[in-house]
Image (cartoon, coloured by chain):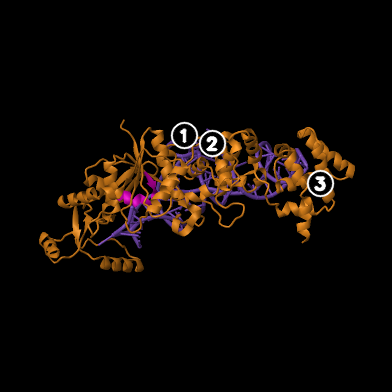
Chain colours: A orange, B purple
Amino acid sequence: MTETRLRFPPSPTGYLHIGGARTALYNWLYAKKTGGKLILRIEDTDTERSTDESIQGILEGLQWLGITYDEGPYFQTDFTAEHVAAAQRLLAEGQAYKCFCTKERLDAKREAALAAKQNLGYDRTCRNLTPEQVAEKEAAGLPFIIRFKVPDREGMLGYDDKVLGRIECNYKEVDDFVILRSNGTALYLLCNVVDDIRDRISHIIRGQDHMTNTTRQVLLYEALKAPLPVFAHIPLTLDTKKSKISKRSHGEIVAVHFYRDHGFIPWAFNNFLVLLGWSPGTDQEIFSKEELIKAFTLERINKSSSIFNFRRDDPKFFTDPKAISINEQYLRSMDIAELAPMVQKELEAEGLWDEAYTGDRQDWFLRTLGLIRDRFHTLKDFTSLGRAYFADDFGIDDKPLQKNVLKYEELKSWLPTLANRYEQLESFDLAETERVPRELAEELDIKPGILINAMRTLVTGQLAGPSMFDILVLLGKEKVVQRLRRVDRLFAAASR
RNA sequence: GUCCCCAUCGUCUAGUCAGGUCCAGGACACCGGCCUUUCACGCCGGCAACACCGGUUCAAAUCCGGUUGGGGACGCCA
């Protein structure tokens, strides 16, 4: 068996979005699974819209996701001569023809057809021009484009799709499409095929929005006498209103970098993406890289499109809840040693990183992550909700402040008392830190919860968190005592 | 308008090719309970779907036909 060769050919007209990322992922998975190669090819022939910034964005997006490629990035514009040569060859062989119809006339016609709800294909005006007529128009200096001459055959043309099965279409339904612009440069349909032939691409995995392109490209493969690759058209990802996801209409929320910037774990996001249109046929949803490569097959890709269920402006679910859920599962079950460098980046970005966390205090750092990660959704939570573990200047949430502190005026004396007793402790351990507030509560004849919840508020700033005594021991006597004594300030600030 | 594709809980999906084991399974979300000083996690339970109409068959989510609905494409974009 010959080597499988796949490609991911983004056009650099914007950032990498989740649809493109999923396509890249599927190609990558299949290449890995079959021991083949993945080629990255930047399709930058649309010079009007291509930007270097987009190229950078796409490269960074792929890198963040961990989607690696074996060849490239190649740039389509580096092969312009080849594309043009192919068009000339088709022209010379009578498989293509010069068309002198002006863009303006065609545009007007198309618009009229659209308005009249009529068929909007090319009418083949120039297909049967005699050589004399062509020569005459050329002599007159009329600009022309080159169109592919769709064979005049009865019957159907088609291909076997790995996802959808046999796809067929009548020859008569296919327009004589343009392969070369009037400025002499080639168009997508042609460039893409010429490049795929040169790159010896064996499998093309792309979105279902390319299906009509494939039908026409099948003709091109035949005309260029090249073997047809295997096609797999994967379902599209739609928004909640069932329209195609695009950079233009959805913005950041569909950009890969949005997920990087919102504290997603790269592999967790891949894990979410792969499930949008593919399933293993078992109940397994969480996959390691190796597991996924092993489990992935083209045959199990879904036929129907899926909805990316993001909700704008929802405070709890800023994107698809399933994506968040999968991220959480990774967050709390992954190897802490693997998680640590990711949290390190977050801390560094907030100026909260301490070199000792990889030195003397590494053990403390890892234990802290292990304790607090259960409640977090993204990596961002370590520096927001979890700020109190890494800094002394953390904010106190209003809710616990009202509910657990300001409600009891007496805490102004209770907490300092508690702080004093803690200060006296020889051994600041789990048993002792729990005994002290419980005894104090009994003396004061109040529920221990009052002291404990107030402590939580003062020590972490949060309403919720891990077991209080775990936290106290983790933070250490000094910090705890210091924070408990701040209670005065809270009342003072509240009364202002 | 023409062509192509698709159709199972709110969402992601299993089951469809090889009809019976499916009054349809899992996950997310939601609701309730347990646990807990808090909130989560965890555990237990609940809500919730075969688009519709015909046909084939002893038997249809599954096969066939139609209808409806949804999507995609129809560029000198990619």
Point out the tag, 3 or 2, that comes first from the N-terminus: 2
Q: Which mark is residue A415?
A: 3
Q: Nearer the viewer, residue A399 or B54?
A: A399
Above or below residue A118? Residue A263 is: above
Which residue is disc 2 drawn over?
Answer: A284
Residues packed near mark 1 inside 10 Å, few (<14), some (14 to 19) or many (20 plus): some
Q: Quadrant of the C terminus of chain A?
A: bottom right
Q: Residue at x 67, y 49 (%)?
A: A393
Q: For the magenta stretch, what is the residue range?
A: A205-215
Q: Residue at 35% of width from left, 58% of height from top?
A: A49
- Tell me the chain of label 3: A
- Residue in view at x 78 percent, y 57 percent: A492
Secondary element at tag 2: loop
Whether pointer 1 and pointer 2 mark residues with C-beta atoms closer than 8 Å, the reply is: yes
Residue B59 picture location, percent across and down: 51, 41
Q: Chain of mark 1?
A: A
CA neighbours of label 3 inside 10 A, class few (<14), some (14 to 19), many (20+):
many
Answer left or right for A426 relative to A183. right
Q: Position of residue A51 (x, y in %)?
A: 37, 55
Name the residue that disc number 1 marks. Answer: A295
The N terminus of chain A sits in image quarter:
top left
Residue A387 coordinates in the image, percent (x, y): 65, 46
Q: Report helix, strand or loop for mark 3.
A: helix
Is circle 1 on the same chain as circle 3?
yes
What's the residue type where badge 1 is placed?
A: Ala
Residue at disc 1, secondary structure: helix
